[in-house]
Amino acid sequence: MKKFYYHTLADDLVKSKKQNFKLSDNYQIINQKFPNGLVRALAKDFAALLTYGYLRVKIVGRQKLVPYQNQGYFVFANHTQPMNDAFMPILLFGKKQYYAIADQANWGIPILGKHILPYGALPVGNDLKQSIKLINAIKKLIKTGNHIVIYPEAHVWPYYTQIRPFPETSMNFPVSFKAPSFVMTTTYQAPKHGKKPQIIVYIDGPFLPDTSLPKKVQQAKLHDEIYQVMQKRAKSSNYQYYHYQKVN
């Protein structure tokens, strides 16, 4: 069994060779030019092979998304699959509508960072100028009916079976843009054969901001609703594929 040692639940345990990679300020944050359609089509095919073929993922509750397929919304998910978390959402949220917010270090990953992420990922800003650029891009995407995935735990912990804390400010976008949110929780069950767990992904929602409340209170309320749903779903995990141990 693979082991990970951590000091806090906010530790970054999976690092790339270019962990400190930074994008320039003139980065084109929404790239819808050729070959966007081709890249997304190929990514969807690869996602199907990875999600349903190699990992044998079962998805529960995807019908909850159908009434909202033509409007903008956010999806909050736990971050436990380094590769599948990047590709699986395209199967659920549409090859044209799916975008994900990601750390800039991901753009330093060979092939993925150069040839795939520029067409569907939105980099977290490293300064005020870049942050404003991200906010404006998300506003445009939500207004035009796109679906944006957020991993509020920030760092991927492979096959981790619990939900790590994340800040109330993670709810800033759905509150600011008065958009619905869904929850996507990946869980791990004991396999019938072999050692790799059965992966079951649950979709819950929608969750709407309470616009009768002040903005910060809206964020806190929405955060609690989403965090509690994630925790509830995570309890269905009954199998540890990797072992996590806290150290002083």
Image (cartoon, grey):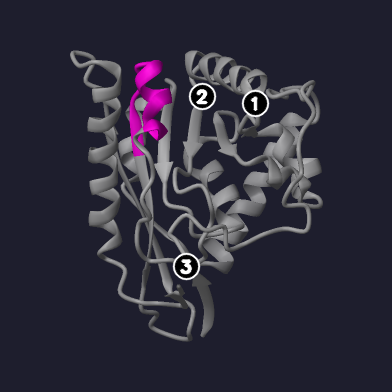
Which residues fall within the magenta stretch?
169-182
Among the two numbered marks 2 and 3 on one chain, the one whose residue lies closer to the N terminus = 2
Q: Report if residue 170 lies within the magenta region.
A: yes
Which residue is found at the position 59% from the left and 48% from the top? 86
Label 1 neighbourhood size at 10 Å, few (<14), some (14-19), many (20+)? few
The quarter of the rendered structure image containing the C terminus is bottom left
- Asked if residue 125 lies left or right of residue 241, the reply is right
Residue matched to label 2: 146
- Asked if residue 19 lies left or right of residue 197, the reply is right
Q: 83 and 104: which one is in front?
A: 104
Q: How far from the left and from the top, in percent, is residue 138?
A: 54, 21
Q: Nearer the viewer, mark 1 or mark 3?
A: 1
Disc on res. 127: 1
Q: How far from the left and from the top, in percent, is residue 7?
A: 47, 66
Helix, strand or loop for disc 2? loop
The relative height of residue 44 versus residue 169 in the rendered view (above or below) is below
The relative height of residue 6 versus residue 142 in the rendered view (above or below) is below
Could you tell me how far apart the alpha carbons at marks 2 and 3 are, in whole angstroms?
28 Å
Residue matched to label 3: 159
Q: 129 and 45: which one is in front?
A: 129
| Amino acid found under the numbered disc labelled 1 | Asp
Residue 206 found in image quarter: top left
Q: How far from the left and from the top, in percent, is residue 177?
A: 40, 16
Among the two numbered marks 1 and 3 on one chain, the one whose residue lies closer to the N terminus = 1
Which residue is found at the position 58% from the left and 54% from the top? 48
Q: Report if residue 202 lies within the magenta region.
A: no
Q: Nearer the viewer, mark 2 or mark 1?
A: 1
Helix, strand or loop for disc 3? loop
Q: Nearer the viewer, mark 2 or mark 3?
A: 3
Which residue is found at the position 44% from the left and 85% from the top? 193
